[in-house]
């Protein structure tokens, strides 16, 4: 499986929308609403898979390379990679190991989840963050994955959840996506927590700053890079 920095996707969006060359480096320029809105042409649902390198069940699942197939073409799944990915980077058995000794309190994924629960106890990693939108202020759902004890269990849970996200995102009425998704998750017995309302743009800026400070990147699977074609 290959992954690519979300920043590279947004550079393509900026070049197309603004007639620019694509060589924009300032994150606050990349994360403009018009660029984030362009992503809606290629995905209708947005998630962040939050895990520490020591969460071996989830890390092994990501390294196994089925995430792109499990999420499908309409669900954009982001995660923090422990290396830059300005061009397509292959993931394999040696990937996701550089941050294994990084304290959980400063790990990019933990800090991203903590920002969603400002003033409330932060649920433990690993988990899946489901965002309502990227271009506007929004809420999110957090689905803990810490009860899963094998790569196979992670794959089964995420395939089930991502298929549900794909379905609900295509059928929900405007403004009702998270409500409908939360109801379906409840019906299926999938634990989830509603987050505080956040600025998705500010949240993504923090995410990029944190990962880059640790020599990493925020990436998505290459299967969702229709923007670059």
Image: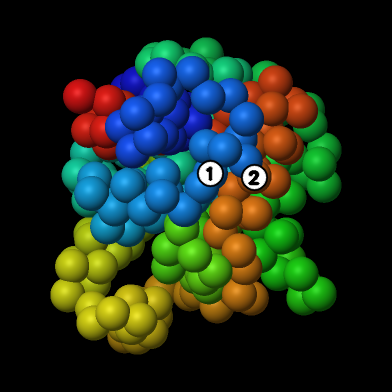
| Residue 151, numbered label | none
Mark 2 lies on residue: 205
Towards the viewer: 23 or 44: 23
Residue 147 visible within the image:
no
Q: Position of residue 149 (x, y in %)?
A: 50, 50
Left/right placement of residue 15 relative to residue 223 reads right
Residue 147 image offset from top left, x and y in percent: 54, 60
Mark yes or no: residue 178 visible.
yes
Cβ atoms at labels 2 and 1 below 8 Å apart: yes
Q: Please tell me whether mark 2 or mark 1 is closer to you in this view.
A: 1
**Disc 2 on helix, strand or loop?**
helix
Q: Element type at marker 1?
A: loop
At x 70%, y 69%, the residue is: 117
Residue at 77 percent across and 76 percent down: it is: 120
Above or below: residue 12 compared with residue 185: above
Residue 10 left/right relative to 95: left
Label 2 vs 1, first from the N-terminus: 1
Q: Quadrant of the N terminus?
A: top left
> With 194 as the anchor, is 19 left or right in this view?
left
The residue pinned by badge 1 equals 31
In the rendering, at what x and y percent does residue 164 appear? 25, 66
Q: Is residue 224 above or below residue 141?
A: above
x and y, in percent, of residue 45 in the image? 32, 58
The quadrant of the picture occupied by the C terminus is top left
Q: Nearer the viewer, residue 152 or 198?
A: 198
What whole-number distance in Å separates the C-alpha atoms at marks 2 and 1?
Answer: 8 Å
How many residues crowd around disc 2 within 10 Å: few (fewer than 14), some, or many (20 or more)? some
Q: Residue at x 57, y 54 (%)?
A: 201
């Amino acid at each position: 499986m290959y992954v690519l920095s979300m920043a590279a996707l947004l550079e393509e969006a900026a070049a197309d929308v603004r007639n620019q060359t694509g060589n924009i480096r300032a994150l606050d320029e990349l994360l403009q609403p018009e660029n984030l809105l362009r992503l809606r042409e290629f995905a209708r649902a947005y998630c962040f898979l939050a895990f520490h390198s020591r969460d071996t069940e989830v890390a092994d699942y990501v390294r196994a390379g089925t995430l792109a197939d499990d999420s499908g073409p309409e669900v954009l799944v982001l995660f923090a990679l422990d290396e830059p990915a300005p061009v397509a980077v292959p993931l394999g058995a040696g990937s996701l190991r550089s941050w294994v000794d990084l304290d959980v309190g400063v790990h990019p994924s933990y800090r991203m989840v903590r920002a969603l629960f400002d003033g409330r106890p932060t649920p433990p990693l690993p988990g899946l963050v489901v965002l309502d939108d990227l271009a506007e202020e929004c809420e999110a759902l957090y689905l803990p994955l810490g009860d899963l004890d094998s790569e196979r269990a992670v794959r089964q849970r995420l395939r089930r959840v991502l298929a549900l996200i794909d379905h609900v995102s295509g059928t929900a009425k405007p403004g009702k996506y998270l409500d409908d998704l939360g109801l379906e998750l409840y019906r299926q017995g999938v634990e989830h927590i509603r987050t505080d309302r956040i600025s998705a743009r500010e949240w993504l800026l923090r995410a990029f700053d944190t990962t880059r400070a640790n020599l990493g990147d925020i990436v998505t699977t290459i299967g969702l890079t229709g923007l670059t074609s």
